[in-house]
Image (tube, grey):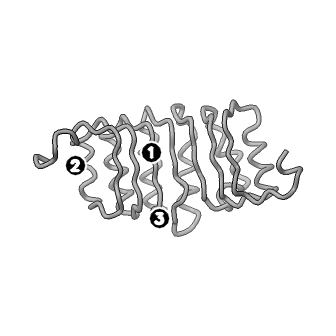
Amino acid sequence: MASMPPRLLSARKLTLLGAVDAAMLPGLARALPGVTHLRYHGATSDGILRLAEALADWRCVEVLELQGAKYDVAAMEAFGPALRELPRLRALRIGGNDPEDSSPTTKLIDCLGGLSSLQQLNLAGVASAIVAQRPWRRRSAGWSSFARWVLSGCAIAKRGIQDIAVALRGRRITTLVLSGNSITDGAAAR
């Protein structure tokens, strides 16, 4: 790490690309412990497993974006609990990924309940099979702190909107973004 420029050693925002050697992540986390905004684009399952390990040293992370990733259930089984250990995490963007099937993202969503610091959840582009399934109500039980929800481009239909409305009833939501969904029934939009 001695070859890194001094200004990098105090970085607050860090963007990682899929080309980053996943094995370097834990060392990078130790070298840059003050990162508050972390973006990881194009991660593989191995990269996400390493990121889960690295998050133990990135305890200051407030905003985490995971986009363009390809992952499996094992990666999410490690990543979800690692997120729960981030006391300052307030925004999570996990939309626009390409899981092998819907199970990994569902596994991650299951781990989000009880994250009291989390205020923003962005699932833009996540398959409607995940967003609109019936267990959504149960999953959202611990999400009382979420003030901003982004569910754009999820192909949510009438039934999904109704389930989401029930799940969010009585919560203090400041922003709910449902753009890019095929809501053709006026009753669903209400």
| Front disc: 3 or 2 | 2
CA gap between label 3 and label 2 equals: 24 Å
Whether 18 is drawn above or below 40: the answer is below
Q: In this rendering, would 162 be left or right of 145?
A: right
Q: Residues within 10 Å of mark 3 (few under 14, many from 20)?
A: many
Q: Which corner quadrant of the image does residue 113 belong to?
A: top right
Residue 64: quadrant of the picture:
top left
Is residue 28 rendered to the left or right of residue 145?
A: left
Determine whether the residue tagged by mark 2 lies in a helix, strand or loop.
Answer: helix
- Earlier in the chain: of badge 3 and badge 2, it is 2
Residue at 28% across, 39% down: 11
What residue appears at the point 51 percent right and 32 percent down from the top-left corner? 117
Residue 147 position within the rendered picture, expressed as x and y whole percent measured from the top left: 63, 34
Residue hosting label 2: 27
Q: Nearer the viewer, mark 1 or mark 3?
A: 1
Q: Which circle marks residue 64 in the picture?
A: 1
Identify the residue shown where x is 35% and y is 59%: 17
